Image: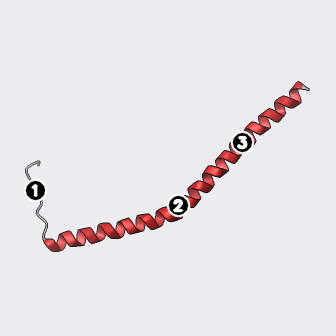
């Protein structure tokens, strides 16, 4: 297995490289779409966390009165 090498013709190589470039372009395009979504989720989560701690603190304040 370790000594078997696959020799690609120039045509296959160029096709492979073209395919990889197309894939990279697609991935980058998807990243630009996904990133704002992820950022939105992060801010939502942090807001939720903050509101949760705020809820707990307000409950404690009420209990102490």
The residue that appears at 56% across and 55% down in the rendered structure is: 38
Q: Mark 2 vs mark 1: which is more N-terminal?
A: 1
Spatial CA distance of label 2 from label 3 is: 24 Å
Q: Which mark is drawn over residue 29?
A: none
The reply to whether the C-beta atoms of the residues labelled 2 and 1 are less than 8 Å apart is: no
The local crowd at label 1, few if under 14, some if 14 to 19, many if 20 or more residues have their Cα within 10 Å, is few
Residue 62 placed where, x, y %?
Answer: 88, 31
Residue extending farthest to the right is 65
Question: What kind of element bears circle 2?
Answer: helix
Q: Establish if 6 lies above or below 22.
A: above
The local crowd at label 3, few if under 14, some if 14 to 19, many if 20 or more residues have their Cα within 10 Å, is few
Residue 60 placed where, x, y %?
Answer: 82, 29
Residue indicated by mark 1? 5
Spatial CA distance of label 2 from label 1 is: 38 Å
Q: Is residue 37 left or right of residue 8?
A: right
Residue indicated by mark 3? 50
Residue 12 placed where, x, y %?
Answer: 18, 71
Q: Is residue 4 left or right of residue 13?
A: left
Q: Establish if 50 lies above or below 44.
A: above
Q: In terms of image quadrants, where is residue 48?
A: top right
Q: In terms of image quadrants, where is residue 50?
A: top right
Q: Which mark is drawn over residue 34?
A: 2
């Amino acid at each position: 297995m370790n000594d078997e090498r696959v020799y690609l013709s120039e045509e296959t190589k160029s096709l492979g490289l073209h395919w990889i470039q197309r894939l990279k372009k697609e991935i980058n395009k998807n990243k630009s779409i996904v990133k704002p979504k992820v950022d939105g989720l992060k801010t939502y989560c942090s807001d939720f966390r903050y509101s949760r701690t705020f809820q707990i603190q307000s409950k404690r304040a009420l209990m102490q009165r």
